[in-house]
Amino acid sequence: QVQLVESGGDLVQPGGSLTLTCTASGIIVSANNMGWYRQAPGKERELVAIITNGGRTNYADSVKGRFTISRDNLENTVFLQMNSLKPEDTAVYYCNAETPFGNYWGQGTQVTVSS
């Protein structure tokens, strides 16, 4: 059974930083494309960042230069380092695994950027 558990969401002031963690079980993160998505109130879920099984990364234009996706193969974990946070980054952030057997989602973690 595949399980993705996100953590690290919090309330942070504009300009601050957070690191989100996605701990996976039932899959090997390095063997699959892993992504972070977010959904703000009243908006559709959008891709934030992805790391492929080959290690390539891609980012939404809105977060390029501020966010970094990475993984720890030994811990089977994916991270999203978020710097220079803006109020428009406020959303529920979801971890996603794109596998040959289907797409899997975590339950989400809330990030709120506000003064």
Image (cartoon, rainbow, N blue to C red):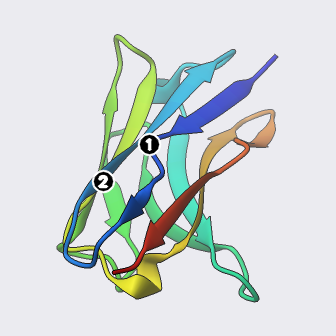
From what the image shows, is residue 101 above or below residue 66? above
What residue does disc 1 label? Answer: 8
What residue does disc 2 label? Answer: 18
Classify mark 1: helix, strand or loop.
loop
Q: Is residue 83 left or right of residue 43?
A: left
Amino acid, disc 1: Gly
Amino acid, disc 2: Leu
* Towards the viewer: 107 or 32: 107
**Residue name at image x 23 percent, y 60 percent:** 17
Classify mark 2: helix, strand or loop.
strand
Pointer 1 or 2: first along the chain: 1
* Towards the viewer: 71 or 39: 39
Whether residue 81 is visible here, answered yes or no, is no
Displayed quadrant of residue 93: bottom right
Displayed quadrant of residue 27: top right
From what the image shows, is residue 33 above or below residue 12? above
Q: Is residue 100 left or right of residue 85?
A: right
Percent x, y for residue 109? 59, 50
Displayed quadrant of residue 104: top right
Whether residue 111 is visible here, answered yes or no, is yes
Percent x, y for residue 57? 32, 56
Instruction: Name the quadrant of the N terminus.
Output: top right
Outermost residue, front side: 115
**Residue name at image x 36 percent, y 70 percent:** 59
Instruction: Name the quadrant of the C terminus.
Output: bottom left
From what the image shows, is residue 57 above or below residue 1? below
